[in-house]
Image (spheres, rainbow, N blue to C red):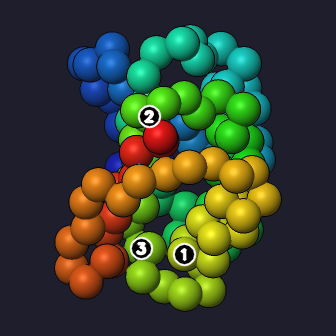
Amino acid sequence: FNTSNQVPKIDDQRGKFYQGLFQQTLPGFLSNFNHNNRKVIMLDADIYSATLYVLTSLAPFLKKDDIIFFDEFVVPTHEFKAFQDFVQSYYINLELIGAANNYYFVAFKVK
């Protein structure tokens, strides 16, 4: 998949692409986002620091029944470790609702 460093154009108002580091783009996104809606979050941050940053930034906005997907959860030093540190630090109660490929892909629901 290659877009020559251009953000893909989509004709669906439910989604939008943001180009840049999470630390550069997530604060602006969160300041304009309607936090009352139920959220389905696809977290494809891959590395520990980025995953932890996103989870920490989202913590105040997570509500019951929001869903978080991870795409490389099985890697013990990155998404999995960030998830563990996040849950232990923020006491967020999450329920595993799906897993595939020996827990490589997982989905959690906020309880």
Residue type for callout 3: Glu
- How far across and down, in percent of the image, does residue 110 sit? 48, 41
Nearer the observer, disc 1 or disc 3? Answer: 1
Could you tell me which residue is drawn at 75 percent across and 51 percent down? 90
Could you tell me which residue is drawn at 64 percent across and 28 percent down? 61
- How far across and down, in percent of the image, does residue 94 sit? 49, 51
Spatial CA distance of label 3 from label 2 is 19 Å
Q: Which residue is mark 1?
A: 80
Q: Upstream in the sequence, badge 1 or badge 2?
A: 2
Res 79 seen here: yes
Of residue 56 and residue 8, the one placed in the foreground of this image is: 56
Q: Is residue 110 above or below residue 46?
A: above
Res 52 seen here: no
Q: Which residue is mark 2?
A: 66
Q: Upstream in the sequence, badge 1 or badge 3?
A: 3
Residue type for callout 2: Asp
